[in-house]
Image: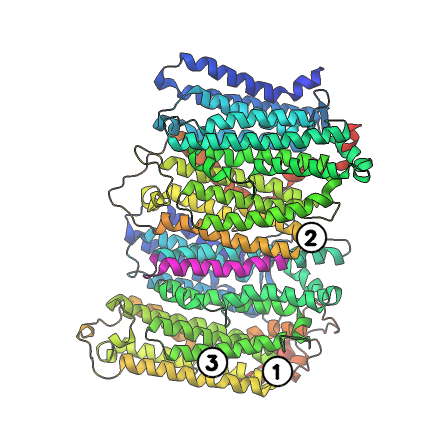
Amino acid sequence: MVWTDYLLALPITLLTLFALGILLIDFMLPKEMKWANAVTALIGVGFSAAGVYKIQLWMNGSPGTLGMLRTMLVDHFALYFWYLFLAATAIAILMSVRYLETEHENHGEYYALMLLAVAGMMCMAAGFDIVLIFIGLELMAISTYVLVGFLRRDRRSNEAALKYLLLGAFSSGIFAYGLSLLYGLTGSTNLGVIQQELARHVMNSDYKPVAVVALLTTITGLLFKIAAIPFHQWAPDAYEGAPTSITGFMSVAVKAAGWAMLLRILVVGLIPMRAIWVPLLVFVSIATMTGANFAALTQTNTKRLLAYSSIAHVGYMLLGLIAGTATQLSPDGIKGILIYLLVYTFTNLGAFAVITALRHRNVIGDELEDLNGLYSRAPVEAVLMLVFMLSLAGIPPLAGFWGKYFIFLSLIESGHYALASLGVLYSVFGLYYYLKIANAMFMGKVEESEERLPISLSMRTALAVTGIATLYIGLLPNRFIEMVNWALGIAQHPNVARLTQ
Amino acid sequence: MQSHILSIILFAPLVGALFLLFVPKENKDAIRWIANIFALAGFLVSLPLVPMFWAQRFEPGFKFVEGAAGNWIPSIGAGYVLGIDGISFLLIMLTTLLGWISILSSWTAIENRVKEYYIWFLFLQTGMLGVFMALDFFLFFVFWEAMLVPMYLLIGIWGGPRKLYAAIKFFLYTLAGSVLMLLGILFLYFHHHSVTNPQVYTFSIVELYHTAPQIYSDYGPRVATLLFLSFFFAFAIKVPMFPFHTWLPDAHVEAPTAGSVILAGVLLKMGTYGFIRFSLPFFPNVMTNPATLLGMTVRGWMIFLSLVGIIYGALVSLMQKDMKKLVAYSSVSHLGFCTLGIFALTPLGLSGSVLQQINHGISTGALFLIVGILYERRHTREIAEYGGISNVMPIYATITMIMFLSSMGLPLLNGFVGEFTILQGTFMENWKWGAWAVPGVVLAAAYLLWLYQRVFFGTVTNPKNEKLNDLTPREVATFVPLLIMAFWIGLYPKPFFQILEQPVNHTIAMVRPDYPQPAVNAAAPTAPLVVPASGVPTTTTPSAASTSAPPKMKGTK
């Protein structure tokens, strides 16, 4: 261990320390002071972000650094995701304060688990060794299982947690099996070495069938985590049962972490097998867009609807990986995925923030009917929700458009016209169910007796941040596009290769 | 130095919308006054454009250009670039005028959620103006899509009984067309990048004019035709051309009156504008390609669909029991004339088409106002509910008569000039096309006069109609500008044709460089912006064009 290692691990260490700190302070806090846990968590996120910034300054433009015994690759790609996780977590914490009070589940563990989950995500995004990636994945997943079941008195929450746990453990098992095969084939757990070995020896040897099995099992595990059809079964149940703030957190941060891991493994480690995994992804992507869009049509529960919508978005994002030639990725496709995750973080969290705000007194607020006449009860929130829905549907000039734009751009660039047409038509299709939400809010029957919704200050902050970000990224995306260009270290193969030698 | 008049016109309504946000919603009258003041201001700031534009009407190229390519999102090459030529100038003036009129007409029609209504309406106004001003494809696309949202809400919140269905149908239909257009735009964008040296990524329309026609030779007719189709769907749905018109009757019937006025008056013109601005100059070879698609050339299909639209729209209008639906279907028929004029690919047909678009905005806008006035008083649009209205509402009956005559194309009124010029341009190209279109004029007279007879003539048969009030001064005020315009275009269309001369000739020269242009057009300005593929850019003599053009155009009267 050298000084560099400590620096690279600083954000993760800080998060862990704060998580443990919250667990210690929580005992001492009286019931009405529980909000202090949220404040501590926010401070932790802030410190961690400062740590990330410190690393960014220290890197001073260099493409990346390998640390922690060559298991961790901190490059712009990792930094980008770290910032993204922290931003999503901060917003999710702001959403949770009032919600947990209403649910009478205001315990410190909630925030501690969130911070630990983020620590796991950071390992996934920066992992350059399949063992570290797997440990990060499990840390994140186990924390999330508990968070999903956090509403102890709610049967749906318990059921969701159990389903998520069982299917999650199952997929982790398959994933670990694939990784162990890769280790057996290449003799290393380092992604860089795996890439070189696969390219040099394995793909031309008798072991190629084993490599294909390794690819299939690994990719199954990865697709499970990002909830692509046909491995999506857990998502709607887990999303519906989980506390709404956690649903929001899962749909953006956990998903982004899954994507970071998927990109690291597919784009670095398994890139020699691109010719094999592209057809698989074509099938999965079409199935995901088709299945999720159709399933979303008939949903009457808003959280479930958004769960299917987020599955559909995974379908579009997968198209970005397909773009390119048989052996070469399209940088625009990866760029599209990164932008997609960025805009999706703000937009989807915003949508879940509005649904969380609907939870008050005896109203759970996650049915489509609960949104009826929202405009008269909470005009600002209703307009924001409209903005989020249109952004999810990809209407310019809102943020969501840019994600889709770069994905389709990369498809056109590399000549996948049919897939591009299919994708855009499905996005029109998707508009229908987003408009269902808009219809309920603006045109649904108004019940006169309803008073205005009480909205807490922290929730207002969360809504303001997500709303402004959605509009700002939509209208002036240039800065964000440049940020993503900066983060695209993953496509710079020469640099990655140089680092591994 | 750049003039910022276009930006001022573009954002005036938006400023009004933002201002309204801060007015308490209980104060309905204040909101109405403020919205009307801003709408009128939006019209007034566009008036200085008239003399400014008139002074340089024969000059080639886009005028009042603002912004620079790639200044908005440099990393992808999208810019905030505005600029107009004669075609967009007329459509912008129509938009500002109709925007003001429709906001004025909503004073009593909208009773609940007044504040939102005006905010969305002003929002919509900015979106529509942006579509006509944008010289950057990306900017164009953003306005084109963003404008759907306020229209969707206007139909969905303040619409009739089936408003939800109509609003969603409108939104989905239009979006389906435009996403395919986005893919087409991206193709042009990459093609531009691959053929220019040094390679540039740009969405600038002026730049794409240079490279897009090469797609035909670079990728072959098949790809070019598919690209043409990707644009065609977006525009054809918007126009709407038969058989993509099915959203229109629903949207029109359910929309509030002012929404219908804007929908018919301006929104539909975006489709025809798109054909003229993009489809023709980008894919000239597809238009002249002799290869057939399902038994007809591409151009043949366009003409065929236009003709079917003319006849079908008119026949369906004849059968309607609901006045608003009748007017809605009449739009299908009238817009059929406009697309016929465009795809006739003659200068006369094209300028007639643009003029007819303006006429349609004036006449059909007025027809929707007329229907709205009766609806506001009686809350029904069933033709059978009325009869003998001219006895109780004489002023109203007179204005209605004038507007009906204008819509059916009676000489001395605007509709005649437009339709006649279109037919003249079409006959020059192929007499059969013109012959098929003529019944549309006759049928228009039939359904409109029959409607007039049933609603206005005779004695008052329904006791509910005996106490109807005639027009209020505010309502008369909404019609006055439309009446003035109808007579002006009908009696003295020369200025309008002069404004259209340069852009129309230029467009035709881009599509058919070898077109034997009439003597007057031989000296017509060819913009240095685009060199016709096989032509040499001719130097322009505006004075010659201006003196020789009018006699030719006078013949249309």
Question: Dot 2 corresponds to which residue?
Answer: A413
> Tag 1's secondary structure?
helix
The amino acid pointed to by label 1 is Ser
Please tell me which residue is depicted at 58% across the width and 59% down the height of the picture.
Answer: B180
Relative to the observer, which residue lies in front, A168 or B100? A168
Label 1 marks which chain's residue? B
Q: Is residue B534 visible?
A: yes
Give the percent coordinates (x, y) of residue B131: 53, 60
Give the percent coordinates (x, y) of residue B157: 35, 55
Q: Is residue B528 visible?
A: no
Give the percent coordinates (x, y) of residue A268: 72, 35
Q: Is residue B367 left or right of residue B431?
A: left
The amino acid pointed to by label 2 is Glu
Question: Dot 1 corresponds to which residue?
Answer: B548
Relative to the observer, which residue lies in front, A157 or B292? A157
Relative to the observer, which residue lies in front, A146 or A201? A201
> In 3D space, how far apart are the residues under numbered discs 3 and 2 (Cα atoms)?
42 Å
Relative to the observer, which residue lies in front, B193 or A108? A108
The region drawn magenta spans: B158-185
> Tag 2's secondary structure?
helix
Q: Do labels 2 and 1 share a chain?
A: no
Q: Residue B311 carries which label?
A: 3
User: Closer to us: mark 1 or mark 3?
Assistant: 3
Q: Is residue B469 above or below residue B307?
A: above
